[in-house]
Image (tube, rainbow, N blue to C red):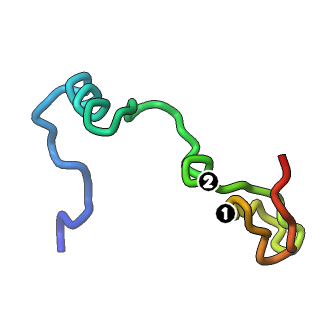
Amino acid sequence: MAGKGSGRRPTQIDDATFASNWAKAFNRDPYEEENPIERVGMWTHDCPAQGVPIATISGAGCNWCDATEYK
């Protein structure tokens, strides 16, 4: 099973061309810092029931402690 998921394939274009093509296709920079939780409409809180930060869908309460989103 050698080679399955072991690494990225060799590129045939330079990084600048890749970034330009990505921006054209997806209308954003592939190297920009983006929080995926905010992108899909979620909010986070430190859940006292779990003792860790929990991400919950916007508009819904936490399944563990019933906390709600506030702004």
Calculate the distance from the C-alpha at mark 1 to the C-alpha at mark 2.
6 Å
43 over 16 or under it: above or below:
below
Disc 2 marks a residue whose amino acid type is Gly
Report whether 43 appears left or right of 41: right
Report whether 47 appears left or right of 28: right
Residue at (35%, 33%) from the top-left corner?
A: 27
Residue at (24%, 49%) from the top-left corner?
A: 8
Q: Quadrant of the N terminus?
A: bottom left
Residue at (60%, 52%) from the top-left corner?
A: 37
Q: Quadrant of residue 24?
A: top left
User: Closer to the camera, 47 or 4?
Assistant: 47
User: Closer to the camera, 11 or 20?
Assistant: 20
User: How many tags in the picture?
Assistant: 2
Residue tagged 2: 41
Residue located farthest toward the left when viewing the structure as drawn: 12
59 over 12 or under it: above or below:
below
Residue tagged 1: 57
Q: x, y percentage for residue 20?
A: 26, 25
Q: Quadrant of residue 63?
A: bottom right
Residue located farthest toward the top when viewing the structure as drawn: 16
Tell me if mark 1 has few (under 14), some (14-19) or many (20+) residues whose alpha carbon lies within 10 angstroms of its own.
some
Tell me if mark 2 has few (under 14), some (14-19) or many (20+) residues whose alpha carbon lies within 10 angstroms of its own.
few
Q: Are marks 1 and 2 in contact (CB under 8 Å)?
A: yes
Disc 1 marks a residue whose amino acid type is Ile
* Disc marking residue 31: none
Residue at (41%, 32%) from the top-left corner?
A: 31
Report whether 53 appears left or right of 1: right
Residue located farthest toward the bottom when viewing the structure as drawn: 64
Q: Quadrant of residue 61?
A: bottom right
Q: x, y percentage for residue 19?
A: 29, 29
Q: x, y percentage for residue 13?
A: 14, 30
